[in-house]
Amino acid sequence: MVGLLWAAGVILGAAGLSKLARPAPTGYALKAARIPGAGFLASPTMVRVAGLAELGVAGYVLGWGGSAAAALLGVCYLILSVVAWRMLRVAPSQDCGCFGGSSEPITRWHLLVDVAGLAIGVAATLWPQPSVVDEVTDQGAQGVLLVGLSLLLAWLCYLLMTALPALATLRAKVADR
């Protein structure tokens, strides 16, 4: 369970960093999805505030662990799930803007990763998990391996949300030729 929590934290942190560096794609996504208050929420300042919050929650999950950190992670993924669901309904071809790129169309895979993050946050709230430092200190080499596998899982989920939709689009273009 702890590896799943850490992977969800890493993904959230990466998205937060991306929003801090490149807020425009997220702003476009919020406007395209017609999120209530999108004019305000899509401003570069508010997108950066959201990115900073995501980064802070990710740091809390990875650095301290525990129920409160997991609950905040669950809340973040609840919000992301609602936004992803809304985008799938209103603007299905729109780029999600989560990772600062312009070729990341929203897909059901994206929603699945967000809902999984929500479920992981809820489960880790009920069954608190340790921080990365605590686990590595307690487990030694096994803890280091767990960190590596968590990073691998986070990378695979990132690819599921970004590269898989791009490959599907490319495949459709090639098939149309």
Image: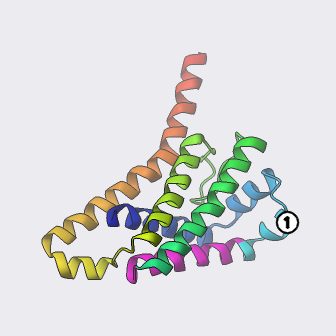
Image point 74% across, 77% down: which residue?
45
Q: Where is residue 82 in the image (x, y as percent from the top left)?
A: 68, 55
Judged by its main secondary structure, the magenta piece is: helix
- Left or right, 129 with respect to 27, comes to left
Q: How is the image coloured?
A: rainbow
Q: Name the residue under label 1.
A: 37
Please state the horizontal and vertical placement of residue 79, each as a whole percent of the image. Answer: 66, 63
- The quadrant the C terminus occupies is top right
Q: Is 17 left, or right, of 149 in this rendering?
A: right
Q: What element carries label 1?
A: loop
Q: Which segment did they paint magenta?
A: 47-65
The residue that appears at 63% across and 45% down in the rendered structure is: 106
Q: Which amino acid does label 1 sit on?
A: Gly
Mark 1 neighbour density, 10 Å: few (under 14) some (14–19) many (20 or more)? few
Whether 86 is drawn above or below 148: the answer is: above
Residue 147 point in image, percent of width and height: 27, 67
Please tell me which residue is depicted at 13% across the width and 71% down the height of the picture. 141
> In this picture, is 57 found above or below 164?
below
The question of residue 1 being in magenta is answered with no
**Relative side of 95 to 149, left or right:** right
Q: Which quadrant of the rendered structure holds the N terminus?
A: bottom left
The image position of residue 131, as x and y in percent, is 34, 79
* For residue 37, above or below residue 167: below
**Residue found at the very far front of the displayed protein:** 126
